[in-house]
Amino acid sequence: MKSKNIILTVVVIAFVFVFAAAYIVDETEQVVITQFGKVIGTPKTEPGLYFKVPFIQNTNYFPKNLQIWDGDPGQIPTLDKTYLWVDAFARWKIVDPIKFFQTVNNTLSALGRLDDIIDPAVRNFITSHSLIETVRKSNRELDTFEIGLEDIMQEKRVSYRIATGREKITEGILKQAQPKLDKFGIELVDVKIKRVNYVEEVRNSVYARMIAERRQIAEKFRSEGKGEAQKIIGEKERDLKKITSQAYKTAQGIMGKADAEATVIFAKSYGMDPDFYSFTKTLEIYNQSLDEQNSLVLSTDSEFLKYLKGFSTKP
Amino acid sequence: MDLQDKLMNWDWEKLKQQQEGRSNVPPQMDELVKKFKKFKLPGGPILILILIALFLGSSMFYTIGVDEVAVVQRFGKYVRIGQPGLNFKLPAGIEKVTKVKVRRIYKEEFGFRTIRAGEQKTFSSEDSNVSLMLTGDLNVAVVPWIVQYRIKDPYNFLFKVKDVRGLLMDMSEAAMRLVVGDRSINEVISKREEIANEAEILLQKELDNAETGINIVTIEMQRTNVPEPVQPSFNEVNQATQEKEKLIYQAKEEYNKEIPAAIGEAERTVKVAEGYALDRVNRAKGDAERFAAVYEEYVKAKDVTRRRLYLEALKDLFPKLGKKYLIDQNQKNLLPILNLEKEKYGIEK
């Protein structure tokens, strides 16, 4: 019984030692071994089962995977004095766990350091660039709907040449912040601007501008409509005149030709004996133009009445 | 602790499993040790052994659903992927299983929130902060969108990034703002497809760079618009275009009302003229023919025909006439004797 107890005790103690000595490093972790506060050996960055000297050595776990840093959104004036609300974020990881362990110790205080370093960098870059640089990323031609304002837009475009653009600004922030983080064993993977917005007061004036801009476009459309309509009305007037005048022209031409033809016919026909023509025609006209309204006074020596006086052949 | 809370909110499932893996093992062992010490009954050790065997045995198999895979870690180190169905592993404490739903499509909403499926969407102030964006022409647009994604690489998904969903959210916003920042307000409103495509490419690139193991299925833009205070003025532009077209159509109506009628009238004028021409020529020909016919006969007996024509004409003419007065050829002056009213048919000699 006694020996069994001893064996049991030994086994238990052995178990305890083994468990105290063994530690697991996860895929997402890395471990720094310390012995009475002093760093021992190289950090364990590969996952798996490891052993240490129990009770004397301590394990210090640090994340190995990509960590998040979310900036404190704040108002920052741009180079052209527009107040912006800028919210940046960054990704970082611990590349040197020993340095990290010695300088910042844990991720929470690391985030504090990142605040101290990235926020000013963001601020520096925003304040040293104009608004448009932080918004745009290229000089892509925009479809701006500015009908009729081409001249003004041309000028604007020239002054709006993007020299840096947002991507380069964030790159710049990264480059400025990275050297300061080396001593913490931190690698900054990227810095991105999540949000850039106008601050409340600026936003309202931007809205006012947008409204004015749209109104102007609307008016343009309206007056275009009126102009277009007037043009059509004008066309109508012109076409009307054209049509009636052309018809008149054609009609007159036709009638003139007919008159001419008639004249030729008459001339040819009556030309055979103009005297006879005037004789017959005159008789005809008498017949047509004289009626009971007219009174006739005849002298007896007229050809018609000459027989009233006698029938001698001599007049 | 604050950080822990955050973590749990972000990725509750994953964390829970990780915690289980890490912290559960030592206490269990301590307990076992204690039990070991306490049991002094005969047969106790055998009971303990059976218990241990049961415990180990039960933790040696696990099932995986059809839409997921298992990531197996041995002492924290990734060893293999378990496929759907019943799977075996080494007992707890040695191998740990994390299930990842690789076939499920996850959805994140930006700038709006669906309350119920197919239901209305509200825009809270936080949401509007997400969707309010500066456009390339320095206007402000409201851009809500959704991102659908799948876990493509469970290894990267679990181990490479601390908070994959958080990163996805941040990156989506950054990518979308980058794309919208290079578009004018008109393009943001009218070319949603193009923006979604560009944002998708940009976002996928960033996610690959960060080794998130996430594959973007699609980015869909919701209704992009201008901020509410500006909307009436945008509608006004639409109205103005309508108005413009209306005015043009009205003018065209006027045109169409008058011009075809005028063309018809013009044709009438021409036809009338043609009629006149025909009439004129035909009459002329008729007159000419008549004249020619008469003349032909006249030539044969000039004098007598002349007389005849004259007399015939007078015969026709005389009865038509009103008063007729005959005056002697020697009478030079009418006034002293002639009572024109009284004598109706008087003939003076």
Image (cartoon, coloured by chain):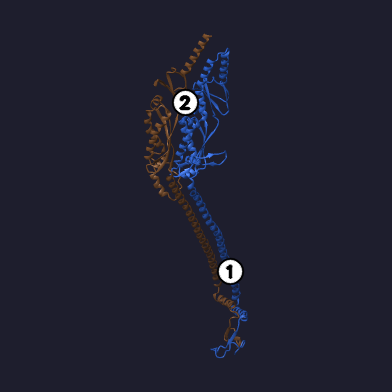
Chain colours: A brown, B blue
Residue ID for mark 1: B285
Q: Determine which of the numbered discs, if any, sits on residue A28 in the image.
A: 2
Q: On screen, A79 above or below A25?
A: below
The percent position of residue A270, horizontal first and vertical second, equals 55, 72
Q: Quadrant of residue B45?
A: top right
Which one is in front in this view, the residue at disc 2 or the one at disc 1?
2
Q: Give the residue type at disc 1.
A: Lys
Q: On screen, A251 above or below A78?
A: below
How many C-alpha atoms fall within 10 Å of the one at disc 2: few (<14), some, or many (≥20)? many
- Per the image, label 2 sits on a secondary structure element best described as loop
The percent position of residue A286, horizontal first and vertical second, equals 58, 78
Q: How far, Cα to Cα, is label 2 from label 1?
A: 119 Å
Q: Determine which of the numbered discs, if any, sits on residue A231 in the image.
A: none
Quarter of the image with the C terminus of chain A in it: bottom right
Q: Quadrant of residue B311?
A: bottom right
How many C-alpha atoms fall within 10 Å of the one at disc 1: few (<14), some, or many (≥20)? some
Quarter of the image with the N terminus of chain A in it: top right
Q: Nearer the viewer, residue A20 or A250?
A: A20
Chain letter belonging to callout 1: B
- Per the image, label 1 sits on a secondary structure element best described as helix
User: In the rendered image, is residue B165 in sight?
Assistant: yes
